[in-house]
Amino acid sequence: MSVGLGNVWRFPNVAYKNGGGAFLIPYLLLLVIIGRPLYYLELILGQFSSQGPIKLWRIVPAFKGIGYAQVISVSFVVIFYNYLMALSIFYIYSSCSACLPWTDCYYPNGTDIVNMTTAEYFWKNEVLELDYDNPDTITHISWKLVISLLVTWILVYITIVQGTESLGKMAYFTAVFPYIVLTALLIVALQNKGSWEGIKFFFEPQLEKLLEIEVWYRACEQSFFSLAIGYGNIVMIASYNKFSNNVYKDAIIISVLDTFTNILAGCVIFAVLGTLAHEKNLPIDDVVDHGGLGLAYVIYPQALANIKFIPQLWSVLFFIMLFTLGIGSSSSQIETVSTVIKDKFPKLRENKSWLSLGLCVVFFCLGLPLTTNVGQHILELLNNYGVSAAGFFYATLELVGVMWIYGIRNFMADVTYMLGSSPGIFWKFTWWFAAPVSLVIIFVYGHVVVDKKDPLPLWAEYTGWFLAFIALIQIPIWGLYVIYRNPSETIQKKILNSFKATKDWGPSDPVDRAGWLAIKNSKDESSKENSNVVLSAVYNQSFQEDIY
């Protein structure tokens, strides 16, 4: 689940925009302080409760709106992930030709017309069909991308209808195949002049960049995307685990594998960037346009074009790989949305295929604006506001709700019952203090700096914040609703009880739940006895003081 498009498509793009090695250091550091602890936490919560992102908040009912907000943000991710998969479909189709279409210059005598590689020209003019005269206005729709998007959603629907078995079989393919393709591309890329300079740029930090808050902000943002944390997906997937599953081992293995995939994809991209910098006699920073999120669709095709042995075959295999990585993520995201709807309307459980079809049709229609000439701008708005900015907020509230309101002692007792041992001091420190404090600092300071550095047109900024508002407003709305519905008599009790775990909170399996309740009740009785002993001692002492 956590190894997908975020690794192969997004990580190299963000690393290139933020200084290569200068980005890698904060990324790895924040992965340890924030990313991995949050991933482990969400696995624990999902496995312990066996519930999705809405019912999970029986732990702190007033925070129920976080689950609904996460589902809306996941819907934004679904929209643009399937658009990226549609791009892969188009590249697969384009690769089935006598020669790769991005290897030849369309204007062999027009060396002064544009200053870009043929792969970049193909991306901007043949794929995106940019309108350079009206860059911020919708002037036309790309019908080839519409068809690609339709094919994508048909394949996603088929995958969903076939159920978890098809996803399980696909997981075996996506677990190995991406590494074969990326390793082959890296070997080919390293044989070209300048490639090692690109690798050096990727691993050698520019220390002055470490003082820029934007680099830290983007690094934290990327850790959320890579591990898919903060949006309810991990909670939903972990809810299907066996109660006693070694979730700690899962968290470590997957997060390490995720980091390795990021670095491998980064090496491929930066090796090709080094070669292009050598050929064009330019600094690596200036080889490709930094705008947008399409770097992967420029550099990977460039790397594929350098393969001598049947490059068309390798191109088809690579973009099939990219598509399958996306379809795994997309299917689980739609399952998250579907689970919430079925929990709210149980009758729909009997019509799962129709519900899935309805969701696919709706999301296909919502994705159509991305197929216009300003699709990349819309993609950035969905990414930066509807998903990334909101994700920081969800994660912070998640930590506050579980660690500060439910209580770290209660949580540790739950984990000890489930796994047989309590998480160590490192996890306690990061969950209770380091992660929430770091998130608040990076989000508040980072967002102010990012907005000032890269100002958007006013309409775009308003649209972006509206997308974030649609998701975030769910938190106070549902919080107030829960408080209003609480049966307590006074407003003070309504509020207090809305922040206490409900009687339904805990393991779902009857046997596991019975054992958990027995231990919980025995501890409650023990604490009552201890408090009675203390009160008795205080009473006797004060009585004796009164006598004497």
Image (spheres, grey):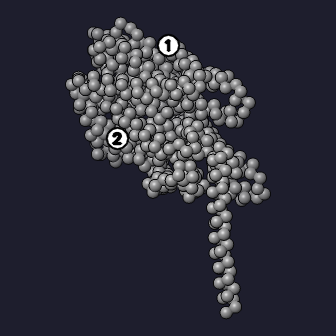
Residue on which the image places disc 2: 24
Q: Earlier in the sequence, mark 2 or mark 1?
A: 2
Residue 284 spot, x, y in % from top left: 27, 31
Residues 273 and 128: in front is 273
The quadrant in which the C terminus is found is bottom right
- Mark 1 crowd level (few <14, some 14–19, many ≥20, 10 Å Cα): some
Query: Does 447 sit above or below residue 372?
Result: below
Residues 152 and 342: in front is 342
Residue 312 spot, x, y in % from top left: 36, 13
Of badges 2 and 1, the one in the foreground is 2
The reply, left or right, for residue 1 in relation to residue 497 is: left
Task: Give the quarter of the image for residue 455.
Answer: top left
Question: Is residue 411 something that shows in the picture?
Answer: no
The reply, left or right, for residue 26 in relation to residue 200 is: right
Residue 361 spot, x, y in % from top left: 62, 21
- Mark 2 crowd level (few <14, some 14–19, many ≥20, 10 Å Cα): many
Tell me the residue at 27%/40% (across/down): 204
Question: Is residue 183 something that shows in the picture?
Answer: yes
Residue 470 spot, x, y in % from top left: 61, 37
Query: Does 388 sit above or below residue 87?
Result: below
Query: Does 411 sit above or below residue 84?
Result: below
Tell me the residue at 59%/39% (across/down): 239
Tell me the residue at 64%/33% (across/down): 339
Amino acid type indicated by mark 1: Lys
Residue on which the image places disc 1: 144
Amino acid type indicated by mark 2: Leu
